[in-house]
Image (cartoon, rainbow, N blue to C red):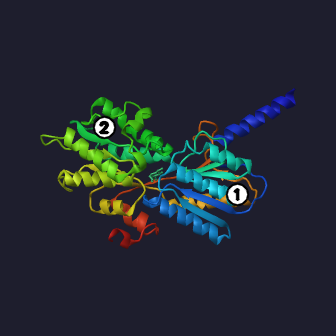
Amino acid sequence: MTRLVAVATASLLAFSLGACTSGTTGGGAATACNVGITMPTRSLERWINDGEQLQSKLKAAGCTVDLQYADNKVDQQISQIQNQIAGGAKILVIASIDGTALGPVLAEAAKQSIKVIAYDRLINGSPNVDYYATFDNYKVGNLQGTFLKEQLKLDSATTPINFEPFAGSPDDNNAKFFFSGAWDVLLPYVTKGTLVVPSGKAPKSNDEWTTIGIQGWASDKSQAEMDNRLSSFYSGGKKVQAVLSPNDSLAIGIEASLKSAGYKVGSDWPLITGQDGDKANVKAILAGEQSMTVWKDTRKLGDRVFTMIQQIVKGEKVEVNDEKSYNNGVKVVPSYLIEPEVVTKDLVQSKLIDSGFLKASDVGL
Ligand code: GAL
């Protein structure tokens, strides 16, 4: 009896320890390094970098690699994955377009003991996801919300501030984490009336984020939405003073709308957030048209996924650092989270150029 209790306590301890420290999980038979990579689209800058970086690392390591982009079309991504399974892939790396649409094709992969790594975006509703590698998505939003709180000095503000929030693509699991991270900082000020939202598009809770979601993270859609808000709710000299944009592709659309509405940098241009460090947006930051971007060094994500693949290939345990945050509705997926960083005008050179993430010529420096 005492021995039984000892074993039970030991495993309980092991489980709770595993939840928040970096650990390893899985491991098993070695496998061939034959990798199928699918990325959402080539129309958003970062995915081109993500795909090509990982492909070249794997090729250099002698792996067989198939890299596909799916034009943000779910069916196209599913058939690309089916082709990779039929083509002999032993490991699938998937940055999903709609994380809830891959259950059936991953069941096919599981029948052949193919390992699946969810890349950047979690895959939901399937037991057949082995690992998840991403950035701390909640922190991305939290950094955006905290930036606006500090820049607007919300705790000491005496007059209401006109503010417009946006959220990401409703089919993207990351978007809810981005929004929750920001809204946990900003909603109290909306509730207090320090931040007012003339368009009325202020979700009452994190769960309502899709009400202001922009499908496909499309710049033309965020531009149209901002045009509509400015023309409908900003008359009689009323000016927007701050905008929560969850990423750079949406920010670039919002900035275009502000320009055509006559806003001028240095006079009435609002604070605008972003994410990704896209070239066009870094130029906008240098020109004062965007206040910050949350930089996610995609090279680190590529390195981490490369390491995970090497560990799987060798049949070793796979290193993870979060075994609690990402429940995909069927299981808690062992994850590796990478830190995002804020980049403002004065940090572009040191963080983006000196690190080699961008070339000076990419951003007109
Ligand atoms: C998110 C991703 C962001 C942003 C967005 C649009 O899932 O984490 O970095 O790029 O998609 O592609």
Which residue shows up at 86% across the image and 28% down it?
A: 2
Is residue 135 something that shows in the picture? no
Viewer-proximal residue among 278 and 47: 47
Q: Horizontal placement of 232 versus 87: left or right?
A: left
Q: Horizontal placement of 141 versus 53: left or right?
A: left
Q: Which mark is residue 155?
A: 2
Type of the residue with mark 2: Asp
Viewer-proximal residue among 213 and 140: 213
Viewer-proximal residue among 318 and 198: 198
Marker count (numbered):
2
Q: Horizontal placement of 235 versus 31: left or right?
A: left
Q: CA distance from mark 1 to mark 2?
A: 53 Å
Q: Quadrant of the N terminus?
A: top right
Give the mark toward the camera: 1 or 2: 1
In terms of image quadrants, where is residue 19?
top right
Q: Which residue is mark 1?
A: 90
Which residue of the protein is positioned furthest toward the left in this rendering?
236
Q: Position of residue 250 (x, y in %)?
A: 36, 51
Q: Position of residue 196 (x, y in %)?
A: 26, 35
